[in-house]
């Protein structure tokens, strides 16, 4: 693998968000589709994984009270099992900073989310009888130095 082959996650310009949502919705498997119009008041931020100039995955994040939420995360099926989904989660956690990060997963993807580092928050039943699992993740907090002066 050369340097040009390295995947990158970058924020998508607001005017390109709908195009990325369309691609991610096509790759989402059994997760519910996201309607871009329903999210416009929440000012979603789209992030794309590119590999050699081609979008191969990404995620959509919104701010909710007290946290950030990944509302859509998907990887092109031809590029799965290469660590790109994990890279998206780590990027989202980094961008979330001190705010917790949450997501909702179906039974097929909850194992991935837990492997990456998300912890179970709760479950909810959908209208069709299927279950969706709510998961959360906090960035690691540095341990305080017992020898540090007060206030540090």
Image: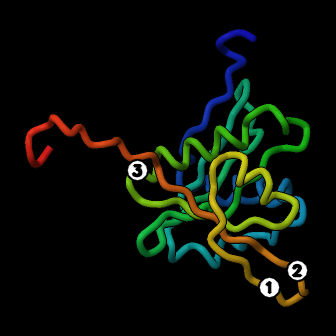
The quadrant of the image that shows the C terminus is top left
Mark 3 / mark 2, whichever is N-terminal: 3
Q: Mark 3 highlights which residue?
A: 97
Crowd tier of the residue under label 2, counting other residues whose Cα lies within 10 Å: few below 14, some 14–19, many 20 or above: few
Instruction: Kindly indicate whether the residue at mark 1 contacts the one at mark 2 (C-beta within 8 angstroms).
Output: yes
Residue 54 lies, with reference to residue 33, above or below; the image says above
Residue at screen point 20% across, 39% down: 146
Specify the quadrant of the image occupied by residue 65. bottom left
Mark 1 / mark 3, whichever is N-terminal: 3
Q: Mark 2 highlights which residue?
A: 130
Residue at screen point 90% across, 86% down: 129
Numbered disc 1: secondary structure? strand
Question: Residue 88 appears at what percent x and percent y?
Answer: 64, 44
Separation (CA) of disc 1 from disc 3: 30 Å
Separation (CA) of disc 3 from disc 2: 32 Å
Residue 106 lies, with reference to residue 142, above or below; the image says below
Specify the quadrant of the image occupied by residue 133. bottom right
Check residue 144 in the rendering and tell me which mark sits there, or answer none.
none
Residue at screen point 85% across, 57% down: 26
Numbered disc 3: secondary structure? loop
Crowd tier of the residue under label 1, counting other residues whose Cα lies within 10 Å: few below 14, some 14–19, many 20 or above: few
Q: Mark 1 highlights which residue?
A: 125
Residue at screen point 41% across, 71% down: 66
């Amino acid at each position: 693998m050369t340097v040009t082959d390295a995947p990158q996650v970058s924020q998508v310009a607001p005017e390109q968000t709908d195009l990325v949502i369309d691609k991610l919705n096509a790759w989402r498997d059994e997760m519910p589709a996201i309607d871009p119009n329903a999210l416009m008041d929440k000012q979603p931020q789209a992030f794309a994984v590119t590999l050699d100039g081609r979008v191969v995955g990404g995620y959509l994040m919104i701010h909710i009270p007290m946290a950030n939420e990944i509302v859509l995360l998907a990887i092109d099926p031809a590029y799965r099992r290469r660590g790109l989904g994990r890279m998206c989660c780590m990027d989202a956690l980094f961008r979330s900073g001190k705010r917790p990060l949450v997501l909702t997963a179906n039974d097929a993807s909850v194992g991935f989310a837990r492997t990456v580092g998300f912890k179970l928050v709760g479950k909810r039943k959908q209208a069709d009888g299927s279950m969706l699992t709510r998961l959360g993740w906090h960035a690691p907090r540095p341990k305080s130095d017992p020898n540090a002066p007060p206030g540090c």
